[in-house]
Amino acid sequence: MDKKSKEFLFKYLNNSSPTGFEHTGQQIWLDYLKPYIDDHMVDVYGTTVGIVNPKALYKVVIEAHADEISWFVNYITDEGYIYVRRNGGSDHQIAPSMRVNIYTDKRIVKGVFGWPAIHVRDAGKEEAPSLKNIFIDIGAESKKEVEARGVHVGCVITFEDEFIELGKNFFVGRALDNRMGGFMIAEVTRRLKENKKKLPFGLYIVNAVQEEIGLRGAEMISRRIKPDLAICTDVTHDTQSPMYNKKESGNLKCGLGPVVCYGPAVQNNVLKMIIQTAEKKKIRFQRQAVSRSTGTDTDSFAYSAEGVASALISLPLKYMHTTVEMVHKEDVENVIKMIYEVLLQAKPGQDYRYIK
């Protein structure tokens, strides 16, 4: 990874992008992408799309999602404590003692998730953290003081952290799910441009909003673009750390390559093309089976309109939906390589059906 890529990665990952409030992260992403595309569009909810060859009739999408899990201010007590509700799959168990940023109309207000001291808790009866009892303290002594700082019901909240490198092989931080995907598809686009690759189709680089609350951004943009082929990327669970059940979640490990997905939403001939490309280019990969759905934006593209030939390439990740999500640098590079090489294999007008 060169200096320019790393600077973009750290800037993008250290920015916040809560579901429904992704615009600042989207601007950072689009500013980086602009030198490598011919055009772009932004829909009414903020999904941002870079376009190469916008006049081409055959359309290929590469996609990630831009939003991160967060919280909403839900209730402010007379004493100035703030109770929350989820915006996406935020984890209540990790909240106590975490620092937070509360986004108001004018500025960020700092706060902490408080928790009773161990000294005063009854070990036999102590409550586990839940949405009923976790609360934020911003150092205010009344509801009036909280509101005077600009905090009101509906303000969005994220955990405060810093994106870092851990050891020589790992990146760690909040919301690698899935802004790391946004980074990877931007890097694919940059390499196509810098390597002067001319694609025989229109390429739509999609950074979708609102995945964490039901794949909504992908649902909207897929109807607008009407692609012929969609290659989505997201994260999946590394199952090697303690407390994972490999019989249920599969045997996946950071550092062993991208994960290709088998499931109803994944078009089998597209998957076959991806695997053959990886084998030809000697990009090692792992395999994962899903049940009814992938749980990613792949589902929205696959079942859009009359159906879109779609596939999923996942990045193995540890500790999903925490502030210490962790990915291996080699996996990041190999997801980029895999998507890049698949695009060079794709052909306009290609029919992926078995029965013709």
Image: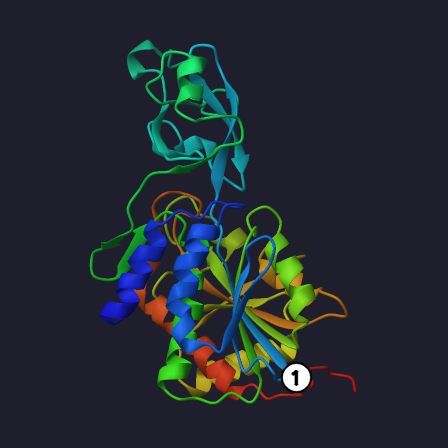
Number of marks: 1
Quick check: 306 above or below 278? above
Does the image show residue 49? yes
Residue farthest along the right direction in this orientation: 356
Tell me the residue that label 1 is attached to: 57
Tell me residue 177's x, y (percent).
Answer: 44, 53
Quick check: 265 above or below 25? below
Quick check: 164 above or below 104? below
Q: Nearer the viewer, residue 105 or 343?
A: 105
Does 254 sit left or right of 151 as displayed? Answer: left
* Residue drawn at point x = 64 percent, y = 83 percent: 58
Tell me residue 287's x, y (percent).
Answer: 50, 68
Tell me residue 70's x, y (percent).
Answer: 47, 39
Quick check: 49 above or below 277? above
Res. 191 image quadrant: bottom left
* Residue drawn at point x = 39 percent, y = 75 percent: 35
Which amino acid type is shown beneath numbered disc 1?
Answer: Leu
Per the image, label 1 sits on a secondary structure element best described as: loop
Does the image show residue 256? no
